[in-house]
Amino acid sequence: MDLIGNRTLRSVLRERVAQQPEKSFIRFEDRNGIYFEKSYGDFYQEVMCFSNALLKLGIKKGDHVVLHLPNNMEFFTAWFALAEIGGIMVPTNILSPADEMSYIIAHSEAVLIITEEDYIEKFVSIQSQTPTIQNIIVTRQLDNADGVLYFSELIKDESDNNVYFPTVFAEDIVALLYTSGTTSKPKGVQVTHANYIYTGELMARSIALTPEDRTFIVLPLFHGNAQYYSTMSAIMVGAGIAVTEKFSASRYFKQAKALGGTVGSLFAAPIRMILAKDYEKEALDNPLRLILFAQSVAEHQLIQFEEQFDVRLLQLYGLTETVGIPLINPLFGIRKNMSIGRPSIGYEVQLVDEHGIPVNQGEIGQIAVKGIPGRTLMKGYFKNEQATNDTFKDSWLLTGDNARIDEDGYFYFVDRIKDMIKRSGENVAANEVERVLTEHPFVFEAAVIGVPDDMRDEAIKAYVILQTGVAISEEALIAHCRERLAKFKVPDRIEFVTDFPRTPVGKIQKHVLRNAIFS
């Protein structure tokens, strides 16, 4: 038997409740600054009541249910209630437009939507395109609306027993997480009970999480990061969770203090946003001992962040498809936070060329992760056998990301394969050019893309956001790059912008930038 065994989300939650029913589980700050709290026991009782309500609505094992919710308490309840009865949650971005939701609902064959009143009209507008939907449940009701059910009413007089619950197994699918769809239609990543348990165990052990900790969630709950790294790690050790409805750069450390968060998780963009705010010395007085992060951050920004807020940063690498974190910097060893770390517990990681052959140390290759589909890696893409077969090669999951390894075994992210620029026969990593640009003290953030060029295949174009209150010319920044990059890597053009198109977790949507070139 492996680390996971036959455990499920159902069995793990029940174990924690049996151990510590009175212990605080979730603390939540809503968008109005109002605080809520639930113990493990109170949370479990609500999960049981909602599970029975779902069964009465006809939700069966294997049914897909869309959670179109902001960060709120009901998200957790719905997630674990569906896990209790064998349902499959499909968490979606509240910013997704109607046409994207129409695709996801139709593709997943979802039978129920759980949402808030702000988004009802979105689903009414696509009703004719989503005939599989049988009901809409609304949380945090404000006004009565026709044709919907209300969460609070459904659970008010419901039983909290589990007599009629179907049997669930570790490798049953319990979630369908759709990718951002930056280059094609979103793909549905199938996540099992075993996947969640494995990544929870892995993360908890990697960061030495204890029952006294409280993970601090400001990233959207529909995203794998908040589910995998923060929620599951806490549950696996019986720790608490602190959640905010929205991320606030100016209030991040105040919220952490008010909610008691000890371990945070951020992406590069939120880190830069926090640094861009006026520094308040009171932010030093915060309970955070560690913040996990992903994506490229300039070295001087990492140093500034750790010094200003007295908290350790730990860079890691993972995808929705890897579920767990195949690479992470060591908590107690040497942190090289310009790297994405070394292989973590239970994974093999190697770099391969376009033929799947491992490259030599120091050479650039695609990150390939070895694991077990449905246990340590995703089970596959829903209704997309071709994409699944393209991603899995002989038990190795191909990530689509290039990296190199240093002499100490640390991996350094180079770029997404699709973001590599071909210029006059030379391969240029956009990430390398972006890193050099952000080393300039006047540059807040940069995004680099290749644009068609008749002479050189592609020319290099950089989009730059400057720090507040400064000015610099395009020529000066190009000169900065020329001093630090090989000639063929220097941008041909720099355009100054005030923001980038982004995913909900702050990733720059380069396909939108490329499309703007041709529009």
Image (cartoon, rainbow, N blue to C red):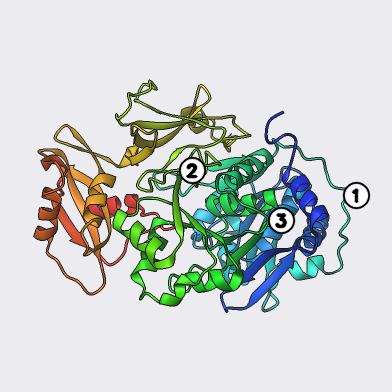
Q: Amino acid at mark 1?
A: Val
| Residue 213, position as x, y percentages in the image | 62, 59
Asked if one can make out residue 497 in the rendered structure from this viewpoint, the answer is yes
Q: Nearer the viewer, mark 3 or mark 2?
A: 2
Q: Quadrant of the N terminus?
A: top right
Q: Residue at x 25, y 51 (%)?
A: 434
Q: Position of residue 221 (x, y in %)?
A: 57, 58
Which residue in the protein does label 2 denote? 319
Label 1 SS? loop
Could you tell me how far apart the alpha carbons at marks 3 and 2 are, in whole angstroms? 32 Å
Gap between marks 1 and 3, in whole Å?
Answer: 25 Å
Q: Amino acid at mark 2?
A: Leu
Q: Nearer the viewer, mark 1 or mark 3?
A: 1
Q: Do tag 1 and tag 3 residues touch (Cβ < 8 Å)?
A: no
Around disc 1, counting alpha carbons within 10 Å, would you say few (fewer than 14), some (14 to 19), or many (20 or more)?
few
Q: Disc 3 marks which amino acid?
A: Gln
User: Which residue corresponds to mark 3?
Assistant: 134
- From this view, report whether residue 275 is shown above or below residue 213: below
Tag 3's secondary structure?
loop
In percent of width and height, residue 118 lies at 58, 71
Q: Residues within 10 Å of mark 3 (few under 14, many from 20)?
A: few
Nearer the observer, disc 1 or disc 2?
2
Above-or-below relation of 203 to 302: above
Mark positioned earlier in the residue sequence (1 or 2):
1
Instruction: Please give the residue where the numbered disc 1 appears in the rendered image.
Output: 163
How far, Cα to Cα, is label 1 from label 2? Answer: 37 Å
